[in-house]
């Protein structure tokens, strides 16, 4: 950053001497160098802000993965009670690069992280792009090189959602590029290539743990050996505040398998794809992280450990991906790969817990986080698409109340498939129909209803009920095709969906 000072010319009897000019420059230089980093950044923002249209509606921002509460629950009201056959009104759509991450919204700025294609191949850069949320107009872009290749053949785009706050945008790429940008201008503030700064073993599908903000800290599940599984950075400067979780956490811990304890190798991954969450239990603040080995509670200020719970699949090629769900003084965790789910009750001392129940079959969430409503949890269970079930279980007992694939009976009775295009048509209405099953879907809760997105693009509105599954509306969206794995987002009564390489915006405002 450079500053320019132009001395004024005095047209009078007195003139500045060379020594006085030198003194003036020295004073200015000293003053500028005395500015704090924060003050300099504010000066930069004031001079380089790229304006956007003002927001046109009241409502909530969706500034991070799973929304303002980190739970997939929206506080917005006044949405459509049901949808027309053709679906809710489409406001705009836009082609973007590949990726699995949801956008994030603050005001009228929506940030999406993607990787443009070069023909059929992934391009050489990742792009953090700010769009105008109301119409999809591009405001700014920031690019950096990427050579990420998914070892299992999935797409090579970003997995983590941007984190937005005031004038900052934080992103984490699949190769471990942690980036802080000025949200108002798109200029870089700081960056860390985590795989260069820490000893991070390769993950199965690249880096995919969404960071979160807590006070002055950006908390990232880095996964660094041997004890940098979780790292807190100063969000303004990028400086490391503390590191925690690893060998000291898991060495010698019981794995629950025939009285075996874990022996640290130094080569294992510490994180999977679950995102952390901050919660308060009995007046004490906790940072809750579902690591690859299991659940850990930390003091978010210091990184000091409160407690840990082993929760890992016996299958090597496995991940913990769903975010823990906090229910009063309890924590619900769930995973696929024959792990199942468990409910822990945190003790009053904040350093202990009791396992209220553990079930390997009731709900096995893969990457979609369950949502708690009253005494029940709703989520998608199943490792593979053909195993995917939308499931309701009791919080108290873990008992399955109901589960569905999203379509009952034989789909060929109601639907007709074109043998050439393989598209489906509803026999009664003649309208193109969505795929009958949800698979491993995603959902959010808004205005008392679930908005469900199936992994083949089926968009549905579902009643919240512990007694039975009741779908209110479903629709087909042209271009919303497999894999639609990014969770829906809602801001100011507009629903935003990301397909692998396209964004859709729908208007859900009721009359």
Image (tube, grey):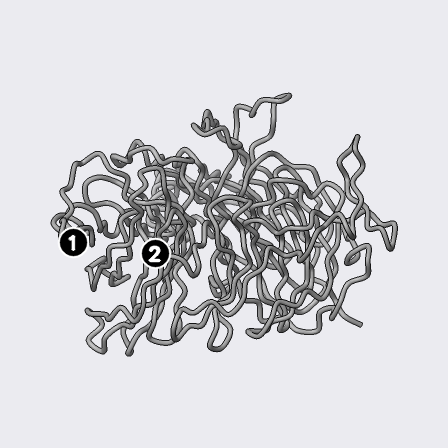
- State the residue at coordinates (48%, 72%): 376
Q: Calculate the distance from the C-alpha at mark 2 to the C-alpha at mark 1.
A: 32 Å
Q: Are marks 2 and 1 in contact (CB under 8 Å)?
A: no
- x%, y% of residue 36? 35, 51
- Identify the secondary structure beneath mark 2: strand
Q: Nearer the viewer, residue 16 or 396?
A: 396
Q: How many marks?
A: 2
- Residue in the image at 31% along x and 47% along y: 313
**Residue sitting at 29 percent across and 66 percent down?**
286
Image quadrant in which the C terminus is located: bottom right
Q: Taking 454 as reference, is 156 above or below it? A: above
Tell me the residue that label 1 is attached to.
254
Quadrant position of the N terminus in the picture: top left
Q: Position of residue 98 (x, y in %)?
A: 58, 35
The residue depicted at 67 percent of the width and 53 percent of the height is 133
Q: Which mark is residue 217?
A: 2
Q: Position of residue 448 (x, y in %)?
A: 62, 73
In the image: residue 71, left or right of residue 506: left
């Amino acid at each position: 950053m450079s500053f320019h000072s132009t001395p004024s010319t005095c047209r009078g009897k007195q003139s500045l001497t060379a020594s006085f000019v030198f003194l003036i420059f020295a004073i200015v230089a000293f003053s500028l160098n005395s500015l704090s980093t924060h003050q300099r950044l504010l000066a930069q923002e004031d001079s380089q802000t790229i304006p956007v249209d003002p927001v046109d509606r009241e409502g909530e921002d969706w500034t991070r993965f799973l929304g303002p509460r980190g739970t997939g629950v929206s506080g917005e009201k006044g949405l459509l009670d049901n949808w027309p056959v053709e679906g809710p009104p489409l406001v705009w759509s836009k082609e973007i690069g590949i990726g699995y991450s949801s956008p994030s919204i603050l005001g009228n700025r929506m940030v999406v992280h993607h990787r443009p294609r070069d023909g059929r191949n992934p391009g050489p850069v990742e792009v953090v792009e700010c769009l105008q949320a109301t119409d999809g107009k591009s405001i700014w872009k920031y690019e950096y090189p990427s050579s990420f290749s998914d070892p299992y053949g999935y797409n090579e785009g970003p997995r983590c959602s941007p984190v937005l706050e005031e004038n900052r945008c934080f992103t984490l790429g699949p190769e471990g590029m942690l980036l802080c940008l000025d949200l108002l201008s798109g200029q870089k503030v700081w960056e860390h290539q985590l795989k260069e700064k820490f000893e991070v073993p390769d993950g199965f599908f690249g880096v995919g743990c969404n960071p979160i903000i807590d006070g002055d800290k950006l908390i990232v599940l880095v996964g660094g050996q041997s004890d940098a599984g979780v790292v807190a950075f100063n969000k303004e400067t990028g400086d490391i505040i503390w590191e925690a979780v690893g060998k000291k956490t898991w060495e010698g811990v019981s794995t629950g398998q025939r009285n075996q304890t874990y022996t640290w190798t130094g080569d294992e991954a510490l994180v999977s794809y679950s995102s952390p969450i901050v919660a308060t239990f009995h007046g004490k603040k906790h940072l809750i992280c579902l690591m690859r080995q299991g659940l850990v509670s930390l003091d978010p200020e210091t990184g000091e450990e409160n407690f840990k719970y082993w929760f890992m699949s016996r299958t090597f090629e496995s991940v913990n991906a769903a975010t823990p769900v906090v229910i009063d003084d309890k924590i619900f965790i769930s995973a696929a790969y024959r792990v199942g789910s468990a409910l822990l009750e945190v003790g009053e001392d904040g350093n202990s817990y009791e396992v209220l129940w553990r079930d390997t079959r009731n709900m096995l969430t893969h990457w979609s986080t369950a949502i708690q409503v009253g005494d029940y949890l709703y989520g998608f269970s199943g490792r593979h698409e053909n195993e995917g079930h939308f499931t309701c279980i009791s919080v108290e007992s873990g008992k399955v109340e109901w589960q569905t694939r999203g379509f009952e009976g034989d789909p060929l009775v109601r639907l007709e498939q074109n043998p050439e295009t393989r598209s489906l048509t509803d026999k009664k209405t003649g309208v193109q129909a969505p795929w009958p099953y949800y698979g491993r879907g995603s959902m959010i809760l808004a205005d008392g209803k679930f908005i469900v997105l199936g992994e083949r693009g089926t968009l549905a509105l579902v009643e919240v009920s512990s007694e039975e599954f009741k779908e209110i509306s479903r629709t087909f969206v042209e271009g919303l095709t497999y894999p639609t794995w990014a969770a829906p987002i809602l801001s100011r009564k507009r629903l935003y969906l990301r397909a692998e390489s396209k964004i859709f915006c729908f208007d859900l405002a009721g009359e």
